[in-house]
């Protein structure tokens, strides 16, 4: 839709007669006044669905599936097989390296924060991946472990909830850190 230049921006026109002290609604129309009625907000705006990035949601879903498979990997390693029986150990190191490089280049930050974040994510997701590979091979050889009584569905459901809670806590920590600055 082309603009003639005479039209004002809709947001400018709708806020033209409002003084800054009269603004009480947030971007989604929610009231930002304090509970004590003081009339000022603390600056914290509730998160919306649009705030969750596709990257974060993807990591959460992948993390949930990896967590479910890692559960079976832990059962396999503590039980009938040894760690590294599914694939040779150097391939696990390659997974850690790939995750580190991908996260380092994907990061919005630069410097020490990016390196620390990439290291933590590579260790976390690399560990999950290593146990998930072991769990996948264990489930391939023993499918009854997950199929009997639909235990695998329950493990997957719990894993997805745990991954979503972990992502929620991560976003909450970022939000509280940003509010503290």
Image (cartoon, rainbow, N blue to C red):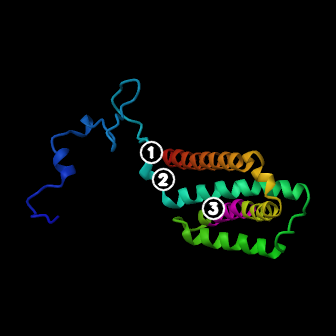
Residue 52's label in the rendered image is 2
Q: Are marks 2 and 1 in contact (CB under 8 Å)?
A: yes
Vertical placement of residue 154 versus 141, above or below? above
Residue under circle 3?
117
Residue under circle 1?
47
Residue density around tag 2, few if under 14, some if 14–19, many if 20 or more, within 10 Å? few
Using the image as rendered, state which of residue 143 and residue 174 is in the foreground: 143
Image-quadrant location for residue 65: bottom right
Label 3 or label 2, whichever comes before in sequence order = 2
Query: Bounds of the magenta span?
Result: 115-127
The kind of secondary structure element at disc 2 is loop
Q: Percent from the top left, x then y, of residue 99?
A: 66, 69
Residue 149's label in the rendered image is none
Observer-side mark, 3 or 2, equals 2
Residue at image point 70% right, 54% down: 67
Label 1 or label 3, whichever comes before in sequence order = 1
The kind of secondary structure element at disc 1 is loop
Image-quadrant location for residue 126: bottom right
């Amino acid at each position: 839709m082309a603009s003639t230049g005479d039209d004002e921006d809709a947001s400018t026109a709708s806020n033209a007669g409002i003084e800054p002290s009269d603004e009480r609604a947030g971007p989604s129309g929610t009231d930002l006044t304090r509970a004590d009625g003081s009339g000022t907000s603390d600056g914290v705006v509730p998160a919306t669905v649009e705030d969750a990035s596709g990257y974060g949601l993807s990591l959460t879903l992948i993390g949930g599936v990896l967590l479910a498979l890692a559960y079976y990997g832990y059962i396999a390693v503590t039980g009938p097989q040894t760690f590294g029986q599914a694939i040779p150990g150097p391939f696990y190191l390659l997974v850690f390296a790939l995750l580190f490089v991908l996260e380092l280049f994907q990061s919005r930050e630069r410097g020490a924060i990016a390196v620390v974040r990439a290291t933590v994510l590579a260790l976390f997701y690399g560990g999950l991946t290593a146990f998930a590979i072991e769990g996948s091979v264990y489930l391939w050889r023993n499918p009854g472990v997950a199929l009997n009584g639909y235990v695998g569905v329950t493990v997957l459901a719990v894993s997805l909830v745990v991954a979503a809670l972990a992502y929620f806590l991560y976003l909450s920590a970022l939000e509280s850190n940003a509010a503290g600055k």
